Image (cartoon, grey):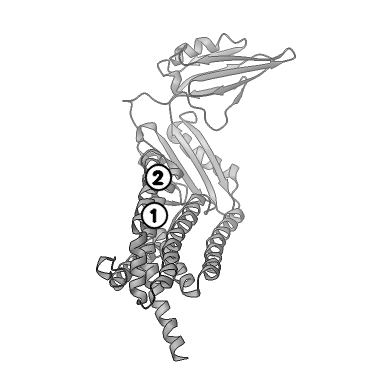
């Protein structure tokens, strides 16, 4: 029987060595190696997503009604409100394919005037940024369009140079470099507010690209108090999950099973966090969701094996505990591999095709599933063997 079983206990020292090496790399990545790339959730400050884009049209309004302009990828809507009611005029990119065509259409609305800066831009690539829908008046409202392919692309170093006067600023490219979208993050200093920080960032960008040469797509501000509470809450959530799991497994099984489960789960969390730190993935609330998901996934796989161990201990009387554990792991191996493979295949499209936090969540999940599968089949059974043997030896001495 033992020759057909997976030699989990026989290779336990090899598995332990591999785990120690991975944990040491993780600890190095989290400390000396530069630590975590914390997102705006965990590091107070301002986070803006900006897009460098040319101005196509300049719109003004000289009437007495309240007029609002809203932008979507394929539509421009002007809403006029007066005592007579509200009237909407919608212009589609299909009917008005270029910015020059769109300008003529917008001027059909009473009181609206349009100055064409670049009439060759595609209406379907009009950008709705921070501040839209916008109220039209005598002041110019600039409409930006994503530049045509083949035009000069602004390098990320140019954006970094534009913001070099701001201390601690971080700039990253979002998506394809041709889209000219950049994520700008800057930490808070004493006395900083969202308004003052936005003014500083946008002022420096305006010097490099003119005030109308870029669009703020998104702007988020996290204060120090909220950031600190989110960090402490996340740590508490992970710790509480491990404590509750310890109690649950202790009640359902025995202390040896509970301790083995917690060791394996702590092992998974440390290696996953080290992986995130090593590759400088952004740490946000999505990361905590991935960690908690992996804890649940890994625990489920471990419980299936431990349940089989408990069952086999009653059926295989007189057999050594190491053989029972190896036999139990072997019996559940196909189920564990198929479950892990199915989950990885389900998450893989998100890792390849998604962007932002969803993609990071998928990548972290895939790595966590691999580590969790390894720990459930090698680390948890090995520690179950060691702890069970130690408790049995202590019992015999008594």
Q: Position of residue 8 (x, y in %)?
A: 31, 68
Relative horizontal placement of residue 397, taking residue 86 as reference (left or right) = left
Quarter of the view holding residue 224: bottom right
The front one of 344 and 22 is 344
Relative horizontal placement of residue 94, taking residue 45 as reference (left or right) = left
Decide: marks 2, 1 in contact (CB < 8 A)?
yes
Q: Position of residue 56 (x, y in %)?
A: 46, 20
Say which mark, if any, is on residue 369: 1
Q: Secondary structure at mark 1?
A: helix
Residue extending furthest toward the bottom: 398
- In what quadrant of the picture does the N terminus appear? bottom left
Q: Is residue 23 visible?
A: no
Q: Residues within 10 Å of mark 2 (few under 14, many from 20)?
A: some
Q: Position of residue 250 (x, y in %)?
A: 53, 71
Quarter of the view holding residue 140: top right
| Residue that numbered label 2 is attached to | 347
The front one of 35 and 159 is 35
Residue extending furthest toward the left: 3
Say which mark, if any, is on residue 169: none
Q: Is residue 143 above or below residue 102?
A: below
The Cα atoms of the two marked residues, 2 and 1, are separated by: 10 Å
Relative horizontal placement of residue 215, taking residue 68 as reference (left or right) = left
Relative horizontal placement of residue 70, taking residue 39 as reference (left or right) = right
Residue at x 47% of width, y 72% of height = 259
Q: Is residue 297 visible?
A: yes
Q: Residues within 10 Å of mark 1 (few under 14, many from 20)?
A: many
Q: Position of residue 333 (x, y in %)?
A: 34, 59
Q: Secondary structure at mark 2?
A: helix
Q: Is residue 285 above or below residue 82?
A: below
Residue at x 52% of width, y 31% of height = 129
Q: Earlier in the sequence, mark 2 or mark 1?
A: 2
């Amino acid at each position: 029987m033992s020759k057909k079983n997976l030699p989990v206990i026989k290779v336990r020292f090899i598995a332990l060595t591999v785990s120690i090496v991975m944990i040491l790399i993780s600890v190095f990545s989290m400390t000396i190696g530069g630590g975590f790339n914390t997102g705006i959730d965990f590091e107070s400050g301002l986070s803006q997503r900006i897009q460098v884009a040319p101005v196509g049209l300049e719109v003004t309004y000289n009437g007495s009604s309240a007029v609002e302009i809203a932008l979507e990828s394929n539509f421009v809507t002007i809403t006029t409100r007066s005592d007579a009611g509200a009237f909407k005029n919608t212009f589609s990119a299909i009917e008005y394919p270029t910015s020059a065509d769109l300008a003529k259409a917008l001027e059909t609305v009473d009181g609206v005037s349009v100055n064409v800066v670049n009439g060759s831009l595609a209406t379907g690539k009009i950008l709705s940024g921070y501040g839209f829908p916008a109220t039209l008046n005598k002041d110019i409202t600039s409409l930006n369009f994503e530049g045509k392919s083949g035009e000069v692309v602004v390098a990320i170093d140019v954006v970094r140079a534009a913001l070099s006067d701001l201390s601690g600023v971080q700039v990253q490219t979002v998506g394809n470099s041709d889209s000219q979208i950049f994520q700008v993050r800057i930490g808070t200093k004493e006395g900083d507010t969202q308004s003052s920080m936005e003014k500083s960032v946008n002022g420096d960008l305006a010097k490099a690209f003119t005030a109308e040469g870029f669009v703020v797509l998104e702007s988020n501000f996290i204060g120090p108090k909220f950031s600190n509470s989110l960090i402490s809450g996340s740590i508490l959530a992970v710790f509480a999950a491990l404590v509750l799991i310890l109690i649950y497994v202790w009640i359902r099984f025995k202390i040896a099973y509970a301790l083995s489960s917690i060791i394996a789960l702590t092992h998974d969390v440390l290696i996953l966090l080290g992986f995130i730190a090593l590759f400088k993935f952004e740490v946000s609330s999505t990361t905590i969701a991935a960690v908690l998901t992996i804890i649940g996934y890994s625990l489920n796989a471990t419980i299936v094996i431990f349940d089989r161990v408990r069952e086999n201990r009653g059926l295989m009387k007189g057999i050594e505990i190491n053989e029972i554990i190896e036999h139990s792991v072997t019996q559940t191996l196909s189920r564990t591999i198929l479950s892990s493979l199915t989950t990885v295949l389900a998450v893989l499209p998100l890792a390849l095709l998604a962007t932002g936090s969803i993609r990071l969540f998928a990548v972290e999940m895939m790595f966590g599933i691999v580590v969790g599968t390894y720990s459930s089949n090698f680390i948890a059974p090995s520690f179950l063997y060691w702890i069970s043997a130690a408790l049995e030896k202590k019992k015999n001495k008594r």
